[in-house]
Amino acid sequence: MPELPEVELLRRQLERILPGRVIADFECRKPKLCRLRGIEAAGPGELVSRMRDLLVGRRVESVDRRGKFLLWGLTGGLVLAVHLKLAGQIVVVGPDGRELARGGHWAPRPGVPLPHRATHITFRLDDGSVVYLTDIRQFARLTLMPAGEVGPFLREFGLGPDGLREPVDAERLEQVFRRRPKAPIKAVLLDQAVVAGLGNIYADEVLFATGIHPLRPAAGLTRPEVEALAAAIPEILSRAVAEGAGPVVGDRAARDNGLPEVHGREGEPCRRCGTPIRRLRVGGRSTYFCPTCQPLSP
Ligand SMILES: [Zn+2]
């Protein structure tokens, strides 16, 4: 699943390409990826043609982000919210066939010609560039709505503060942790109401950075530990953006240096102390940690 730093990197690429461009055509081969909110459609069979009618001819004015939602601001007061979910990918190809932007899941891999058989959505832009949305799992979602619907739409997802844009408040974290006395800290950090966009990889990294074992009960953390977590969350996420969001492919960290420092590195020596990194499962998710730097009983 693309994590917050990857979505932010994709947003920054799209922000250099899309604003000012007019959507010249829109195709969707999987209507279930599309939604209209606050806009009438005659029936499910009409959804894609209605969406196409609404999108074609509109200029993209901005590319914003809230949590892992990319928000394309369009002329005429419409907003297209794009969420890549588990396995969505966006690639933009320029009029000369050169790749201008890429983000999301690594399927298809770079070099595979687009459109791929799982490329369900295509936007053609007025300068001849093409935006491809490929999703092998078909969970990605595009929601077109009037700008006034964006607030209520996002509130339905109960997103917490954005870990890259808003400071994380230790007081608030502590309150959230107390409400879930038995839950392991790793599981609580994955709750999007705690911090929007903190996913499996960076939750592990934040715990490593603060020396907290992933299985410790959230409610048992000391105040200094909670303060350290609150500080580490934006720090690690910004570092991930700066480093290009260290890729993890098939649960393995794809490069030797930079982030992630523990996630996807089972058996590799901890960079701080040399102890082999271990893996366990918390709430069904692979969790990586250093048993020396992150003791279970501090
Ligand atoms: Zn260590």
Image: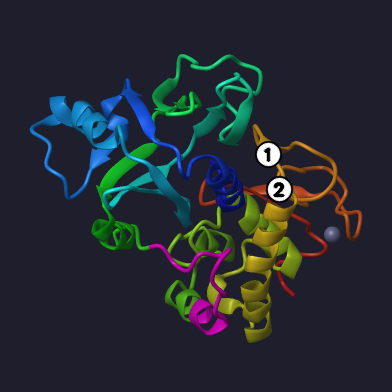
Helix, strand or loop at label 2? It is loop
Q: Compare marks 2 and 1 and give the one earlier in the sequence.
A: 1
- Looking at this view, is 16 or 228 the one in front? 16
Which mark is on residue 263? 2
Q: Which residues are magenta?
A: 159-174
Which mark is on residue 291? none
The type of residue carrying mark 1 is Val
Compared across the picture, whether 292 is left or right of 112 comes to: right
Residue occupied by mark 1: 248
| Residue 23 visible within the image | yes
Q: Is residue 269 above or below residue 136?
A: below
Cα separation between marks 2 and 1: 8 Å
* Residue 17 located within the stretch drawn in magenta: no
The type of residue carrying mark 2 is His
Residue 273, horizontal then vertical, whole percent: 91, 59
Image quadrant occupied by the C terminus: bottom right
Give the image quarter of residue 96: top right
